[in-house]
C-alpha cells in the first residue's frame, strides 16, 4: 500500500514523516480492534456460566452489559480533545494498557459490584480506540483507500467476538471463565511493544497548528447530528449481537455451549468478511470515478435493510431455518459497518476528526446503554426475544433512512479557519471534492 502520507497538496504544506510500511501499522490497528472486541465481548460469552455461578437474572446481566457504556460514553465526550492535541499513537497505547489490565482483573475479583466496577474501567480504556483510528486514517490516507482500511479495522473488530466466542468459549467450558479473562488480559499486553516500534511517527517541519475547531463549531453542523443519529442506529444492532447473541442461542434456541460458540463464531466471521469485501469494493468504485456519496450511502442502505430483514426472519424462523437468517444479518451488518467511519473522516477532515468522532461516538453509544438493558428487561417481561429483535430491526431501517436521506452531500465541512490545502484534498472547496479525488490518482503512489 502507499506510504502513510499520500498528498495532492504541495510539499511545502506537508509534514515530513519517517516512512514505515503501512501494512505493518495498519495490521497493528486491526489487531488492536480485534483485542478491543475480544475483551469487550468476553462477558457475554461467559454470561451463561456467570448466571449460574452468581445467580444473577437477565435484568442484572443487562445492567452488567450496559455498565461498560456508562464510562465508555462519558469518556468519549472528553477524549476528542486529547486525540486532537496529544500524540494519538500514545493515546491509543495508553487506552489498550488500561483495558487489558481491567480484563485481567475481572477474572480475579468476586461479586456483582466489583464486576460492575471493572466493566466501567474497561469502558474508560476502550473509549479512545475509534477516535484514534479515525484520526490516524484521516491524516495519513486519502479517501479512495479509506474504505479498505476502515473495512479491515471493522473486520478485526468483528473477528474479535468470533475468536472470543470460539476460542474463549471453549476454554471457558473446560477451565471456567476466570482463568480465561486473566490470560486474555495479560496476552493483550504483548501488542504494546510492537506498536511502540511500528506506530506512524511524524517529524513536523514547523510547529503543528493547534486544532481551532471548537465543540460549538461541530455541534452547529446538521451533518454532525445526522452522523450521530446514524451512528446510534449502527451501534444498536452491533451491541445487541455482541452482548446478547450467545445468551439468545443458548436460551432461545436451546443450544449447548459447544454448539453456541460455533454458531456465534460463524456469525462474526461472516460479518467480518462482509465488512472487508465491502470496504475494498467501495474503494475500487471510487477509484473508477463513481461519486463518493453514492457509493458509501448505497453500501449503508443495502447493508442495513438486509440486516433488518435478517433480524425479522431470525426472530420468527423455526429451529431449522433461523441459521440462514442469522447469516443474512451478518452479511447486512458487515456491509453496513464497513463505510461507517469513512463518513466522519471525510466530513470532518484531519483538522477536526478526533473531536467530531468522539462527540459523535458519545451520542451514538447511548445505544450501548439502552440496548443491553432494554433487551434484558424485555426478555424478562415476555419470556422470549421477539420484541427485542423487532426493535433492533426497526432501528436498522431507520438507520438506512438517516444515511441516505438525512445526511445530505458527503463533502468535507468548510471550517472557517481551515488552511487552503490539507491532506489529499482542498478543504474549503467543497464543490470540487470529487474532482480532487479523481485528479489525485495521477499523483498517488500505486498500491
Image (cartoon, rainbow, N blue to C red):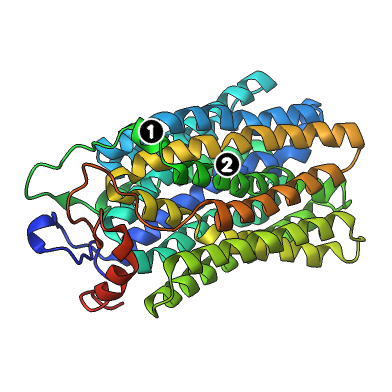
- Callout 2 environment at 10 Å: few (<14), some (14 to 19), or many (20+)? many
Please indicate whether residue 372 sits to the left or right of residue 358 in the image.
Answer: right
Image coordinates for residue 289, horizontal then vertical, percent = 39, 78
Q: Residue at x 66, y 66 (%)?
A: 331
Q: Residue at x 73, y 57 (%)?
A: 308
Please indicate whether residue 383 sits to the left or right of residue 173 in the image.
Answer: right
- The residue that label 2 is drawn on is 40
- The residue that label 1 is drawn on is 79
Image coordinates for residue 59, horizontal then vertical, percent = 78, 28
Image coordinates for residue 383, horizontal then vertical, percent = 91, 38
Q: Residue at x 14, y 42 (%)?
A: 208
* Quadrant location of the N terminus in the rendered image: bottom left
* Quadrant location of the C terminus in the rendered image: bottom left
Secondary structure found at label 2: helix
Please indicate whether residue 156 sits to the left or right of residue 176 in the image.
Answer: left
Q: Residue at x 47, y 33 (%)?
A: 101
- Ranked by sequence position, the earlier of labels 2 and 1 is 2
Q: Nearer the viewer, residue 27 or 288?
A: 288
Q: Quadrant of residue 283?
A: bottom left
Q: Which mark is residue 209?
A: none
Of badges 2 and 1, the one in the foreground is 1
Amino acid at each position: 500500500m502507499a506510504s502513510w502520507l499520500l498528498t495532492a497538496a504541495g510539499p511545502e504544506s506537508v509534514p515530513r514523516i519517517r516512512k514505515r510500511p503501512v501494512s505493518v501499522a495498519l495490521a497493528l490497528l486491526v489487531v488492536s480492534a480485534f483485542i478491543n472486541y475480544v475483551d469487550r465481548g468476553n462477558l457475554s460469552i461467559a454470561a451463561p456460566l456467570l448466571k449460574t455461578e452468581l445467580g444473577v437474572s437477565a435484568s442484572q446481566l443487562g445492567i452488567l452489559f450496559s455498565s461498560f457504556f456508562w464510562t465508555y460514553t462519558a469518556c468519549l465526550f472528553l477524549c476528542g480533545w486529547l486525540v486532537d492535541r496529544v500524540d494519538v499513537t500514545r493515546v491509543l497505547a495508553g487506552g489498550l494498557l488500561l483495558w487489558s489490565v481491567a480484563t485481567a482483573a475481572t477474572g480475579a475479583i468476586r461479586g456483582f459490584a466489583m464486576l460492575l466496577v471493572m466493566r466501567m474501567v474497561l469502558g474508560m480504556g476502550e473509549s479512545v480506540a475509534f477516535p484514534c483510528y479515525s484520526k490516524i486514517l484521516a491524516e495519513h490516507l486519502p479517501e479512495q483507500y479509506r474504505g479498505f482500511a476502515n473495512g479491515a479495522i471493522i473486520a478485526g473488530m468483528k473477528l474479535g467476538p468470533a475468536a472470543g466466542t470460539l476460542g474463549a468459549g471453549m476454554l471457558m467450558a473446560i477451565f471456567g471463565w476466570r482463568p480465561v479473562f486473566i490470560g486474555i488480559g495479560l496476552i493483550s499486553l504483548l501488542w504494546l511493544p510492537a506498536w511502540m516500534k511500528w506506530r506512524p511517527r511524524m517529524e513536523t517541519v514547523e510547529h503543528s497548528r493547534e486544532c481551532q475547531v471548537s465543540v460549538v463549531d461541530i455541534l452547529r453542523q446538521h451533518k454532525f447530528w445526522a452522523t450521530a443519529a446514524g451512528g446510534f442506529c449502527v451501534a444498536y444492532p452491533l451491541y445487541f449481537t455482541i452482548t446478547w447473541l450467545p445468551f439468545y442461542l443458548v436460551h432461545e434456541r436451546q443450544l449447548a455451549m459447544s454448539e453456541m460458540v460455533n454458531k456465534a463464531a460463524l456469525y462474526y466471521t461472516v460479518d467480518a468478511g462482509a465488512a472487508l469485501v465491502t470496504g475494498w469494493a467501495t474503494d475500487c468504485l471510487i477509484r473508477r470515478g463513481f461519486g463518493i456519496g453514492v457509493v458509501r450511502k448505497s453500501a449503508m442502505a443495502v447493508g442495513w435493510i438486509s440486516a433488518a430483514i435478517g433480524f425479522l426472519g431470525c426472530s420468527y424462523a423455526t429451529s431449522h431455518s433461523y441459521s440462514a437468517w442469522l447469516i443474512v444479518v451478518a452479511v447486512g451488518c458487515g456491509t453496513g459497518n464497513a463505510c461507517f467511519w469513512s463518513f466522519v473522516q471525510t466530513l470532518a477532515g484531519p483538522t477536526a476528526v478526533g473531536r467530531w468522532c468522539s462527540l459523535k461516538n458519545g451520542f451514538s453509544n447511548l445505544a450501548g446503554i439502552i440496548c443491553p438493558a432494554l433487551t434484558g428487561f424485555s426478555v424478562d417481561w415476555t419470556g422470549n426475544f421477539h420484541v427485542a429483535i423487532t426493535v433492533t430491526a426497526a432501528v436498522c431501517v431507520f438507520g438506512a433512512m438517516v444515511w441516505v436521506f438525512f445526511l445530505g452531500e458527503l463533502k468535507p465541512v468548510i471550517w472557517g479557519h481551515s488552511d487552503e490545502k490539507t491532506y489529499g484534498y482542498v478543504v474549503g472547496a467543497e464543490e470540487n471534492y470529487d474532482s480532487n479525488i479523481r485528479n489525485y490518482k495521477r499523483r498517488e503512489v500505486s498500491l
